[in-house]
Image: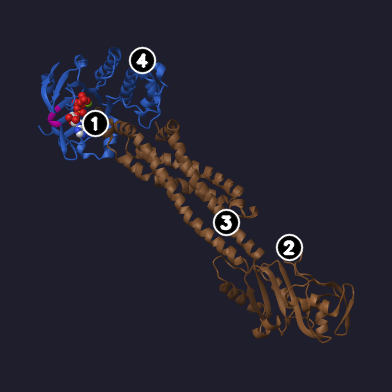
Amino acid sequence: MGDLVISLDSVSKIYRQGQKETLGLDAVTLHIQEKEFVVVRGPSGSGKTTLLVLIAGLLRPSQGVITVNQQNLERLNSQQKAAFRARNVGFVFQMFHLVPYLSVLENVLLGTGQRETEKTRSVNLLESLGLGEKLSSLPAELSAGEQQRTAVARALISNPKIILADEPTGNLDPVSAQTVLDHLDQFQKGGGTVILASHSDLADRYANRLVHLKQGRISEGLSVTADEEDRKGNPAGTPQS
Amino acid sequence: MKIWRLVIKEIGYRKVNFLLSLMAVAASVGLFTVFVTTGEGYRNETRKIQLGMGQNLRIIPLETRMDQFWSAGYSELTMPEEYVYRFAALDGYEYTHLTATLQQAIDLKGRRIILTGILPEVMPPGRNQPPIMFSVERGEVYVGSEVARFFDIQEGQGIDLEGRSFRVTRALSPTGSNDDIKVFGHLEDIQELLGLEDRINEITALECLCLIESGQTELDALALAEAQLAEILPEGKVLLLRGIADVRERQRAAMEGYLGLLTPLVILIGGISIGILTMLNVRERYEEIGILRAIGRGSWSIATLFLGRALLMGVLGAPIGFFLGGLIALHFGPQIFSLTSGALRLNFAWLALLIVLAPAFTAIAAFIPTARAVNWDPLTTLRDS
Ligand SMILES: Nc1ncnc2c1ncn2[C@@H]1O[C@H](COP(=O)(O)OP(=O)(O)OP(=O)(O)O)[C@@H](O)[C@H]1O
Ligand SMILES: [Mg+2]
């Protein structure tokens, strides 16, 4: 398969709250190729969100190196990281996180950066997600499923290389969940890389790799499709392995 | 999506916070406008107050011995009558009533009387007001009450003075001063009687404003007047009798000090309110900040989100406050600050300045909350747990 887009080398994250320290992620090493659909599974508190957020550069690891799209995130300042995210990463949150005073369409346009030219594309995308009737609705006027589909559209609109989806179906009915997963699948088939975190098996059948997290550690790397083959297809390896 | 559109949209969505902020700006600007408008009004008014209730300026011959002057009530010496006109032509002196007198005590049938020649009031240029000092026609005299009583003079009778006869047109009622032993005539008549043509021994400028700036003391004013007049009236000497102007001047100074204290206080309170309201706004928007960060918007975008909002409240609040404050000052100024409405004017130069200053001020007030927003860790709000 394609090139290595994400690599984590013994990455740990320790959350500090005053005296208390919580291990969010414990020496995780993970390499993800282009066009992979990786589903990260694990119980609540196992570190799924931590993992995604570290990859997005929204959080700094306590230890280890994260490289995304050949870029060592540690070397970027926060301004550069923001620009990096704008170009490379689309994030879908568990709790949608839409801007409350912007309409569905405007929330999606928010994902296009400063350009205003993406309106037609945004409208088409929203229509394909079944939100054609809701373009000018505010998030508060939407069902959970509609909000999540809006969030997915916002992540997709900027044509990122990678989509990080944190429990994108957690709050959805089966039909909405299906629509969302189909779009992520389409994105992956179109050449994108998807990392999806979930504690359910709903997304498993879309995955070509399953990663299990338990107490911040990868407990088993189960390949649904040809995981071994993927690894062979990555002669470059990672900077530190 | 341009950040500015977000700013506008957010204002429309969270109207209350913005309206409260706008009110804080408008109230600060408004109070400031009231202060500067009434302050300027006071400054205009001060001139009027000094004019209206001002000191009386007396100019007497330079060599006058003051013991003689105060015991006789007039100077034995004289100076040129022309001095009145020189004084009248001076710039920087305003007065309502200007006159000159020539006085001298003479014996009239064994009694002392004071012959007093009065120059009809010299009107300030461009002004026309009823004289407060009487003027006597040529050939006529007014007699003080004591003179009338002693010589049993009735109005309409004649009187002989130094060999000339005059008609008594008025017998004055008692004044309780040495006016009661005076006989008043036209200056020229008295000059002729005394053989002192074109001479006077006192210039009196009533309700005179003699370039006294606020804060100057009586001594300053006297020294100033003396210095200024010495050149023009070399044979003259200034006596300055301060009146009620002092009291009013002190009131005004107190008021100005009071306003000077209140203005920074109002600005401080306004600034703190805006800071707090912006802080509340930032708190409400942590999630949004997180979203923008996750989407890849940089610190500048987030700073613009809040500073833009603050600038907007300044730009809108300044004219609102200015016109409200102006309206209040013009409408209530006369009652509250006992200013005449003529002294109050809305100075539009302030509006221009305020439209620049208010946004700068709101931006500064919003700075700390904005800095917090910019440095806020997006994850704290985006955590799904
Ligand atoms: N900001 C934080 N401060 C302190 N501890 C944290 C913080 N974020 C996460 N943790 C802890 O780190 C561990 C991993 O959390 P994380 O959110 O990554 O789990 P998760 O797998 O996403 O859970 P869920 O399925 O409930 O979303 C948990 O024990 C959590 O309590
Ligand atoms: Mg999570």
> Can residue A54 be seen in this snapshot?
no
Identify the residue at horizontal 29%, vertical 35% (top origin).
A83
Q: Amino acid at mark 3?
A: Glu
Of circles 2 and 1, the one toward us is 2
Position of residue B159 in the picture relative to residue A168 (left or right): right
Q: Given the image, what chain letter belongs to the residue carrying mark 1?
A: A
**Label 3 close to label 2 by CB (< 8 Å):** no
Identify the residue at horizontal 40%, vertical 18% (top origin).
A134
Q: Residues within 10 Å of mark 3 (few under 14, many from 20)?
A: some
The colour one sees for chain A in the rendered image is blue
Q: Amino acid at mark 4?
A: Gly
Position of residue A67 in the picture relative to residue B291 (left or right): left
Q: Amino acid at mark 2?
A: Arg
What is the secondary structure assignment of the residue under circle 3?
A: helix
Are callouts 1 and 4 both on one chain?
A: yes
Q: Residue furthest top?
A: A175
Q: Residues within 10 Å of mark 4 (few under 14, many from 20)?
A: some
Question: Which residue is labeled 3 in the image?
Answer: B40
Question: Please, is residue A110 above or below residue B333 in the view?
Answer: above
Q: Nearer the viewer, residue A137 or B59?
A: B59
Question: Which residue is labeled 1 in the image?
Answer: A56
CA gap, disc 1 and disc 4: 28 Å
The colour one sees for chain B in the rendered image is brown
**Label 2 close to label 1 by CB (< 8 Å):** no
Count of numbered labels shown in the rendering: 4
Q: Residues within 10 Å of mark 2 (few under 14, many from 20)?
A: few
Give, as a single range, the part of the protein colored magenta: A24-30
Q: Amino acid at mark 1?
A: Ala
Of the numbered discs in the image, which one, if any, rests on residue B127?
2
What is the secondary structure assignment of the residue under circle 1?
A: loop
Dividing the image into four quarters, tell me where ligand 1 lies. Answer: top left
CA gap, disc 2 and disc 1: 83 Å
